[in-house]
């Protein structure tokens, strides 16, 4: 039996070889007698088994449920009362969470409104009406635009 295999069975079944499967016991005993490494592993497992008792659970008392209910009834329930400071702070946190998204949406709406306002004809001092929005759109779409006229100053 290899040391890794012995260690695996040792972890599964403990140091008492009587709890190991019957077909493995003879191989484990011969391997244990022939190897100092396996003897040290077995001694460590035996010491651990002695430290850890197998059954440490105690049955619950007869009035276990009643004692829990009585303790719950006698405990002050101040934590359930209304706390305006806590409610206000939670409300503020809920408001601040979507604030960046609202700011970005506001900038988008402001840009759209500004774009529509810039498209309206503006009165120039000479009395001619010029549509700045169309002029810029023509520049963007690479259409022929007259930027300077011989008649203008």
Image (tube, rainbow, N blue to C red):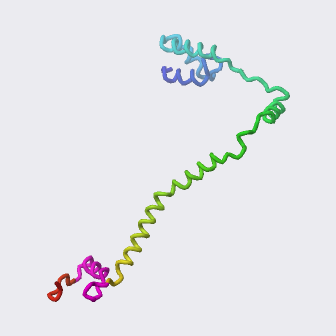
**Residue that appears at 66% across and 48% down:** 84
Q: Is residue 108 magenta?
A: no
The residue most toward the front is 125
> Which sits in the foreground, 62 or 39?
62
Give x and y (percent) for residue 65: 82, 33
Residue 152, quarter of the rendered image? bottom left
Residue 90, image x, y percentages = 59, 49
Q: Is residue 52 left or right of residue 76?
A: left
Residue sticking out furthest to the left: 150
Tell me where residue 139 sits by quadrant. Answer: bottom left
Q: Quadrant of residue 64?
A: top right
Image x and y of residue 74, in percent:
80, 33
Q: Is residue 6 left or right of residue 139?
A: right
Is residue 123 rendered to the left or right of residue 150?
Answer: right
Viewer-side residue, 49 vs 103: 103
- Front position in the image: 96 or 139: 96
> Does residue 99 lie above or below 106 as drawn?
above
Viewport quadrant of the C terminus: bottom left
Q: Residue visible at 29% across and 80% down?
A: 132
Question: x%, y% of residue 119?
Answer: 35, 80
For the record, the magenta segment spans: 123-143
């Amino acid at each position: 039996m290899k040391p890794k295999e012995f260690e695996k069975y040792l972890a599964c079944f403990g140091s008492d070889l009587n709890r190991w499967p019957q077909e493995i016991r003879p191989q484990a005993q011969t391997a244990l007698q022939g190897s100092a490494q396996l003897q040290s592993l077995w001694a460590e497992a035996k010491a651990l088994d002695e430290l850890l008792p197998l059954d440490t659970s105690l049955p619950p008392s007869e009035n276990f449920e009643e004692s829990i209910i009585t303790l719950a009834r006698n405990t002050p329930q101040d934590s359930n009362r209304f706390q305006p400071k806590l409610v206000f702070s939670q409300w503020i946190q809920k408001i601040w969470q979507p604030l960046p998204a609202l700011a970005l949406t506001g900038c988008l709406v402001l840009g759209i409104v500004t774009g529509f306002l810039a498209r309206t004809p503006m009165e120039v001092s000479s009395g001619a009406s010029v549509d700045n929005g169309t002029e810029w759109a023509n520049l963007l779409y690479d259409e022929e635009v007259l930027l300077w006229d011989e008649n203008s100053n």
